[in-house]
Amino acid sequence: MDGSKVYVDSSVVLRKLLDAPGAVPHWGSWTLAVASELVQVEALRTLDRLRILGELSVTEYADCVEELGLWLSAFELAQVDRAVLRRAAGPFSTDIGTLDAIHLATALLWMEREPAELTFVTHDRQQAAAARACGIEVQFTP
């Protein structure tokens, strides 16, 4: 993945942020990382849930929030705008949930506007299948 341009979904950010097994080994080696601004919402909701459940201490929570902010400042964050929502609401050739459809629509629209291809990086099997079905190169790690 060195030197590549990637779309990073929330599963990748959260696994790395929480230092979970199987996190992408090449984190940060890409030349460009694109993500939906939805990543921030999904990550912060997950971190807050883990704090409330006692799976993260207040200090760990604060550290994760700070680290997330640093990472997101290095990403090209795509807005969840009307075009993204329209594309996400349209048909896909595979079963895909709402938030995953927003991620996929974001990647597809970004690739339409930019000359470069993206590799869609995810830990979500269903998301990987949907991205492949749309013709996007995928790096899937279960």
Image (tube, grey):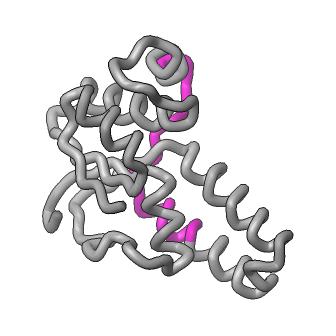
Residue 141 horizontal side relative to residue 85, left or right: left
Residue name at image x 63 percent, y 51 percent: 42
Choose between 4 and 53: the one closer to the eye: 53
Residue 43 at what x, y percent from top left? 62, 58
Locate the C terminus and report the quarter of the image it occupies: bottom left
Quarter of the image holding residue 33? bottom left
Residue 62 horizontal side relative to residue 132, left or right: right
Above or below for 7 versus 93: below
Residue farthest right in this picture = 52
Quarter of the image holding residue 126? top left
Quarter of the image holding residue 85? top right
Indicate whether residue 75 is drawn in magenta.
yes
Residue 18 horizontal side relative to residue 109, left or right: right
Residue name at image x 52 percent, y 16 percent: 89
In the rendered structure, which segment of residues is drawn in magenta? 68-83
Residue 41 at what x, y percent from top left? 66, 50
Choose between 135 and 59: the one closer to the eye: 135
Above or below for 137 versus 69: above
Residue name at image x 50 percent, y 80 percent: 19
Indicate whether residue 22 is drawn in magenta.
no
Choose between 25 and 63: the one closer to the eye: 25
